[in-house]
Image (cartoon, rainbow, N blue to C red):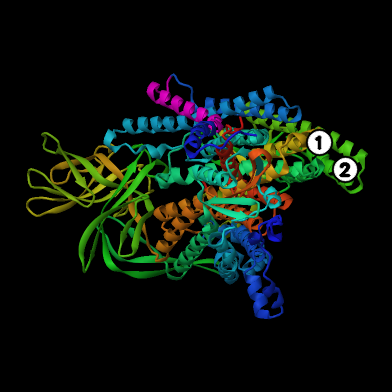
Amino acid sequence: MSSAVEETKTDIRVTPAAPAAKVANARSPVTRLLNLLSSVRFGITLLMLLVVFSMIGMLVMQTNVEGFDKYFADLTPATRLLFGTLGFFDIYHAWYFNVLLLVLSLNIVLASIDRFPGAWAYIRKPKVEAGPVWLKTQQVHEVVGVRGASREDVARRVAAACESVGLKRPRVTEKGTRTVVFAQRGTWNRLGAYAVHVGLLTIFLGGFMTNMFQRNGQMPLAPGETSSEMAETTFNLDDRGLQLGRSSMDLPFEVTCTDIQQKLIRLDGPITADNTIDWLTHIRIKDENGEHTAVVHMNNPHDYRGYRFFQASFINVGRARQIGLRLTPEAGGQPVDVTIPRGGSAKLPDGTQIDFVQFQPDFAMSGAQIGTASGEYNNPAAQLVVRTPDGKQERAFAFAQELPSGAPIGRAVAGYKFRLTSFEKVADAHVLAVQKDPGATVFYVGSTLLCLTLSAVFFFSHQRFWAIVEEREGGTFEVALGGDANRNQLALEDRFKRLKSAITGEPIEVES
Amino acid sequence: MSEVLKTPAQVAAPKIDANWRSLRLYLPFLIPTIAALALTLLRIQMGGANFINDGALMMLALAGYLIGAAFLLTNLYAPSGMAQKIGLWAAGAGYFFNLASWCIRWVAAHDRELEILQRNGYGPEQMPWVWRYIPFANLYDLSLAFACGAGLTTMLISGRRSFRFIGALSLPLASLILILARFIGDEFINLPPVLDSYWRPIHVGTASIAYGVALVCFAAAVLYLLKVGTKPESMAIWASVFAILTFITVGGQFGAFRLVLTGNYAASTVLEGSRMSIPLRVQLPWVGPALIVATLVLLAVSILFGVYLKKQSEKARAWGHRLLVASLVVQVAAIVLLVTHIKSGEAFGPCPASGSFFSKCYSTTQYQEFGAWLAGQQGMQPEQVKTLAPAQLRGATEEFVQLSGSRLRLSLNANPVELAALITAFAATLFASLFSFRTEKLRAALPSAEKLDGLMYRTASVSFAGLAILLITGAIWANESWGRYWGWDSKETGAFVAWLTYGGFLHARIARGVTGKKSAYFAVVAFLLVIFTYLGVSYLLPGLHSYA
């Protein structure tokens, strides 16, 4: 006869009821607090609170979002006061949000500890016995009849059938007139949820470390410039609205920009983001360990000594990475074509040196001041310095457009007339983002763990099967089969069908 | 009763057979997938000039899904093996065309940019890698992939007889997504450089599958609610409330409830040659009145069904159903009018001072707000805009109208969220009405509540795992591109919120034993959050994911 426990509808270990001791001590405030903190119901409430706060953060524009100043200006004073007092404009950094995350982490830890013994029991003390009534309450169950020499012989063959369908280490238990064969697979799956929560907590830890120790800044760089600090932007909301602040942080090395490049889709198009394939910044890093070079481009950051360099933005004023010039001798003769890189020089056969000083995309002159009317390539011109072999130096300009004859700015210098024949478009400067984040590695570890464990938990399951063999009249035996799984009912049903087929020899029923 | 036990050696034979039989379960998914890949290879071989394009394939996919949905729905009401077979074949064809459309779009995007780059003198060694062109660049691409994910999930589970019904609900939803994609427009965009990363196919591919599975979970939850006795009338009340909220909030950029206040619906415009939506709205004759009538009728429906549920009044129930059907007719009229006006290409200008209610024109009452918007677009700070006099703002708009008024156009792409909301409201009321028709027969045709509950749990589990992987891959990509793995960007937060909700669903179920209706409500809310993340965040909230 099966025990009372066996006859209950659910396996006693999965019942999430609070232990009796807990109820007895419920009056103690500490115990009550611990009970609350380890309760899944409380955890779900915290999750829903997190949902609500996160949604508030989505719907109320946050201070670090572009356009916040306009949003803030459009709010009524009462709304500003209310949202400001409640911390809604920067809710993800509000004290109550952090407390919520902390309590949620605590809840995950305590609830896991609370429930671990139940899960561990599946591994340490598998339920190897079962009764026919209890078996009928399982997710899958069926009774089949077979012939055999003896109950032991049938049980042995049932055990072999279990192994043939991938079930591990079948156990055979004799109990009165019955023999119970128990087999299972995927027992580890019962611990999967704990591994998932460890992954989640590791991510939280990474997030916490990021919040505490992360430094973020920017470093604008044009070719030839060197910097050893990053500028950090701070957001402060006061009665006047959003105030942007700046501070700088010294880096333990020096970064020099040697070249910047912008790969465009249409070469005749603008240097805007929608016409760009990639931005490349060539840098040289120097410190007490020596020098090395690197290229930072989109989606390809460069790591050095715990710092990461990314492409962040660019100064959208058109410049030239290199220019092509045609120099026509004033006295007549064959024109000379030269190509000069940004900030570079070219020497002519007669010893004249031409320095490429600056490039103006939309040339404009105000008095003696040379500049650009806009950032676009409307009237491109190269600003040059010409040094003659006898040591004289003079300013010259090369325009892409034809200048009116006799225009003073287009006059010949050092015996040459200059014409800009080509140029490779590039931005004025690139802005690299610099990040130091000790929490990122922890976050990556937690993420990997979470992905692996979630896949393992949801795509596999702990399947248990019982077969009760009882002798019937005329040398026949009745095998009552039953099985359950903590998830993935379809896989359970499939294996159950295979097991039944392996025992009876009948073909598998497949849905079609 | 069988005769004898097999020996272990003999047991191996049915295993091979079982593998083949198990494989057969996945044939509805495998055959269209292989066929779509073969068609893509053919496209690569033949080139695009004489080959069917992705837009046409998308329309065929839509037709397949709609036909599939119609036959599978018919099969629910009047069970027929033939209707189910046709429905499943049509669904399979829809999934095939959907996947082929997405794959061929990939090839076409590659060809397009290759041609531009070659024209600009780039050599073969400078050509970007092929993953750059994977169609995950904008909301159109994502919609195509989302519908494909829903089709894929439907076909995967259609191998099992007991779950074939799911297409009756998942296919109409997939069709809705494709209709939305049609409105968004299938122009290729130059890929923003930040998106040119190998993380994009991983991250967005996960999104498509997770969203598709979530859609099937939602379908299972709705059918579960129906199965366990939730009255279609209470579903109709919820659908009506959603539709009413939609109708009273659409049609006004400057201030909500414009429809209610003015009685007119006005559509956003675009400037010729640009994709940017302009909030100078053009009123469309008769659309507003039709939506107001629909609102009033649905209000009456809600009241009548409320009375029925409270007092069991059969008269109120009967009238409620009549009016629900009437509201469907009015909604169809409103949508047809709206699309016809937008597509007609008829010229429009500023509204005359009087008698303009039934004219297609833009009202001058919005000039002041539009002037402020223009000033913002020109880089003025909000404080500066506030210092401008109303006359100055109106003057700025008049100047804009003089200079660019002739270039203003109506376009279905100008406000796809609004159109999607109108169509979703229609679909919600349509389903509420369908569920009211021969409800008991429908309930009997559905699988058992346990099976539906099990399907809901399984799909929610996969959605939860998928959304987790989506969040993590997104975080890693963000760390590679933006230098931070989490920044509470609205899209990130939206996906996080949906993930938390599925997390709540699973914890409530696994640890607290919550199943049934409560569980189904969780699944419905979680899917609404997924939709909000997918669509609402991109168009309604500012953030770094504005392209998709």
Element under label 2? helix
Residue highlighted by disc 2 = B304
Q: Residue at x 26, y 65 (%)?
A: A254
Give the residue at the far top of this rendering. Answer: B50
Instruction: Tell me if residue A421 is in the magenta stretch.
Output: no
**Looking at the magenta stretch, what is its main secondary structure?**
helix
Instruction: Examine the rendered structure and indicate whether residue B283 appears above or below residue B374.
Output: above
Looking at the rendered structure, whether the residues under marks 2 and 1 are on a common chain is answered as yes
Element under label 1? helix
In the visual, does A342 lie left or right of A273?
left
For residue B405, say whether it is visible: no
- Quarter of the rendering occupied by the C terminus of chain A: top right
Q: Residue at x 92, y 42 (%)?
A: B313
Q: CA distance from mark 2 to mark 1?
A: 21 Å
Q: Amino acid at mark 1?
A: Glu
Q: How crowded is the residue under tag 1: few (<14 C-alpha within 10 Å), some, or many (20+)?
A: some
Indicate the position of residue B414 as horizontal and vertical percent values.
Answer: 59, 38
| Image mark 1: chain | B
Q: In this rendered view, identify the residue nearer to me: B318 or A120.
A: A120
Residue highlighted by disc 1 = B440
In the visual, does A215 lie left or right of B429?
left
Indicate the position of residue A323 as horizontal and vertical percent values.
Answer: 23, 43
Magenta segment range? B24-49
| Image mark 2: chain | B
Q: In this rendered view, identify the residue nearer to me: B166 or B420.
A: B166
For residue B424, say whether it is visible: yes
Q: Amino acid at mark 2?
A: Leu
Q: Residue at x 50, y 40 (%)?
A: B138
- Quarter of the rendering occupied by the N terminus of chain A: bottom right
